[in-house]
Image (spheres, coloured by chain):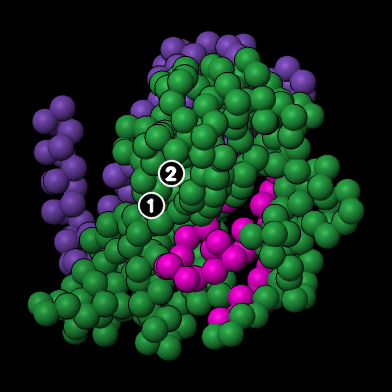
Chain colours: A purple, B green
Amino acid sequence: MEIIIRNSSDQPIYMQICEQVKSQIISGALAAGTMLPSIRSLARDLRISVITTKRAYDELEAEGFICTVPGKGCFVAEQDLKLAQEANLRRMEEHLQQAAALAKGCGVGKEELLAMFGLLLEEE
Amino acid sequence: MNALEIRGLTRSFPGFTLGPLDLNLPGGCILGLVGQNGAGKSTTIRLILNSLRRDGGSIRVLGLDNQDAAFTQLKNDIGVVLDTANFPETLTLKHIAALMRGSYTRWDEARFNELVQRFGLPENKKFRDFSRGMQQKLAIACALSHQARLLILDEATAGLDPLVRDEILDLFREFVADEEHSILISSHISSDLEKICDYIACLHQGKLLFTAEKDALLEDLALWQGSAEQLEELADEAIVAVQQQPYGVTALVKRAEMPAGAQLEKPRLDDVFLFVVKQQGKGACGK
């Protein structure tokens, strides 16, 4: 498992952990059943707060990416890839909503926004 | 269980009153005390150790009232490092270890030797010939070698160079890897507190300005810069504190209350502390 914490990032630390663990689960780098480090040892190794680490694990568990077996530890949960895909779609929608709100706020119209998006897609 | 529970703590001196103070240190966590010189950090710590009698309120340390007769025995469970280490001047490491063996029922000689080696402390020098850094390291080695469950550190890393401070912060992190272990640490060096604390409590003129979970505090707040007119346009509830500067305004703001797209920077603990304390001086309300 690889996790890189950026203190300069605007994204809260717990979210940085969540996102990185999630993407490694979705990409298959972290297989179902893999044992994750304990909250305390991860906090120590990443040199971050225990509370923040716990928050990240709680979030991951609530979203079904990991599960806690009392007395044994945290494990990568059996993934329903459709669900993961669904989650990704939801996130795309969120980002697009933000872009739409921003566009509306500064008077950028539908045509211009679509053109911009088209350009971005072509670049890739 | 809370490792520390302080309720309505007060203590008056001529010209200075501490409290009433309410403070919790949840077990397994690190709580940092920040504040200016004379804000009451050391007084609070001395009251916790009962080396100073309180006027009112209550203090429970590891579940026990610190004025209880059994508190003396509980001191085995508390590792204390104050800003100046205090050992008899003419003693060498060997003698100090013997002294500790006699003072603590669970003195762990192997652990002590390991830390002494890690810190590179000289074997044959007398304590008075130790440099200040060495004296602090020795005090920290002692505090970590009697199987304490709670560390109380008053400016323990002051006077140490960044490399050693970093090494010591790692030792503290290792210490709380056990969820029964907790740390209360006061420091001027807010970058150190920012690195290791779970919770931050800010003292100012004997009063608690705020306590907060550190990461949430630094993530919920943000620094914003702009002109005085732009500041006018911001919602009142978004602004925590403002600093006027010759060519513009810097404000500490609540991230969630700011309009989308605003240019925000993540604050350091130092920024939050300075903004809130200065705002306090102006008589406006802080967070």
Give B103 or B124, whichever is nearer the viewer: B124
User: Local crowd at mark 2 within 10 Å, few (<14), some, or many (≥20)?
Assistant: many
Check disc 2 and give the amino acid type.
Answer: Thr
Residue A107: which quarter of the image? bottom left
Q: Quadrant of the N terminus of chain A?
A: top left
Give A103 or B171, whichever is nearer the viewer: B171
Q: Residue at x 76, y 61 (%)?
A: B59
Q: Which residue is mark 1?
A: B189
In the picture, measured across the screen, residue B31 lies left or right of residue B250, that is right
Q: Residue at x 18, y 33 (%)?
A: A121
Give the magenta part as a residue range: B16-45
Give B260 or A91, whichever is nearer the viewer: B260
The chain under label 1 reads: B
Q: Position of residue B222 (x, y in %)?
A: 34, 61
Residue A46: which quarter of the image? top left
CA gap between label 2 and label 1 equals 8 Å
Q: Residue at x 56, y 40 (%)?
A: B87
Q: Position of residue A89 (x, y in %)?
A: 42, 35
Q: Nearer the viewer, mark 2 or mark 1?
A: 2
Q: Quadrant of the C terminus of chain A?
A: top left
Q: Which numbered disc flags the more N-terminal residue, 2 or 1?
A: 2
User: Local crowd at mark 1 within 10 Å, few (<14), some, or many (≥20)?
Assistant: few
Check disc 1 and give the amino acid type.
Answer: Ile
Q: Position of residue B91 (x, y in %)?
A: 54, 31
Residues at badges 2 and 1 in contact (C-beta under 8 Å)?
A: yes
Q: Which residue is mark 2?
A: B157
Residues at marks 2 and 1 on the same chain: yes
Check if residue B30 falls in the magenta segment. Answer: yes
Q: Is residue B111 visible?
A: yes
In the picture, measured across the screen, residue B106 lies left or right of residue A2, that is right
Tag 1, which secondary structure?
loop
Tag 2, which secondary structure?
loop
